[in-house]
Image: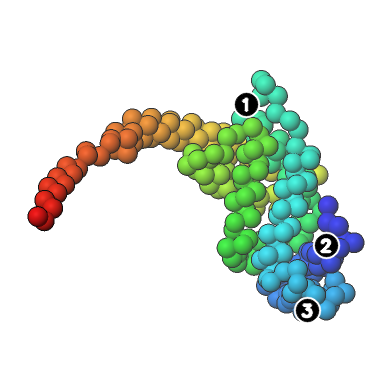
Amino acid sequence: MIDTTTPKGRILAAALALAAERSWREISLADIAEKAGVALVELKASFDSKAEMLAAFSGLVDDEMLRRAPRRTSDQSTRDALFEVIMSRFDTLGPYRAALKSIAGSGFADIAHLRAVMNAQHWMLAAAGVNTDGPAGVARAAGLATVYASVFRTWLDDEDPGFARTMAALDRRLRRGESALNRMDEVCSGAQRLASAILPSIFGRRAKPQPQPEAPAPTPPAT
């Protein structure tokens, strides 16, 4: 998944390898550059921070997950489709679990990393055939983020080869979130209908024409 023939790939691979060995918080940019075999100035050309590295890694995971996730069938429920997509993501993350455990334990995420996390929710929903447009899509992504974050912690500590604990936790959280998602869709649908009814009357009303002043009578020519 990580192309180590490129400088960016070598830097990402080095960062994750170091995270698997020790605390992510203690790893410096200089440590990563040394591990990757590049000068610090070369690292700077690719990434400004460790958070940017995590965001880039998350994007690669999105790509691989979308390649692996099975296509949703016409008779498959949203919950079952999301279950398969999220498990595909965990399968993709499997080789990096030790590193991710260190990173998760650091307890810090900046805007670049948080944006990548939310983007991942968007692509998981899209892979499951769920509409992500508009305010309802944003709410769905936020809801899935809470589900994913909870199950992700279970996955990090699940030593069962078949990830039985992870699958049970994911199924439980998706079932709980399904009813909340349905309620949210009803609220958003009602809000959209209300907006469709009100906005045209506000913005579609034509302004009344203002009376124009009469032109002054022409001055008679001097005789």
Residue at mark 1 to residue at mark 2: CA–CA distance: 37 Å
How busy is the neighbourhood of tag 1: few (under 14 within 10 Å), some, or many (20 plus)?
few
1 or 2: tag closer to the N-terminus: 2
> x%, y% of residue 216?
13, 49
Mark 1 lies on residue: 77
- Name the outermost residue toward the right: 5
Dividing the picture into quarters, in which one does residue 45 lie?
A: bottom right
The residue positioned 88% from the left and 74% from the top of the image is 37
Dividing the picture into quarters, in which one does residue 100 lie?
A: bottom right
Q: How is the image coloured?
A: rainbow
Circle 1: residue type: Ser
Q: Secondary structure at mark 3?
A: helix
1 or 3: tag closer to the N-terminus: 3
2 or 3: tag closer to the N-terminus: 2
Mark 3 lies on residue: 41
Give the left or right position of residue 207, taking residue 119 as reference: left
Mark 2 lies on residue: 9
> x%, y% of residue 215?
16, 47
Q: Relative to 204, say whether 110 is above or below.
A: below
Mark whose residue sits in front, 1 or 3 = 3
> x%, y% of residue 1?
83, 52
* Residue 177 is at least partly visible in this image: yes
How busy is the neighbourhood of tag 3: few (under 14 within 10 Å), some, or many (20 plus)?
few
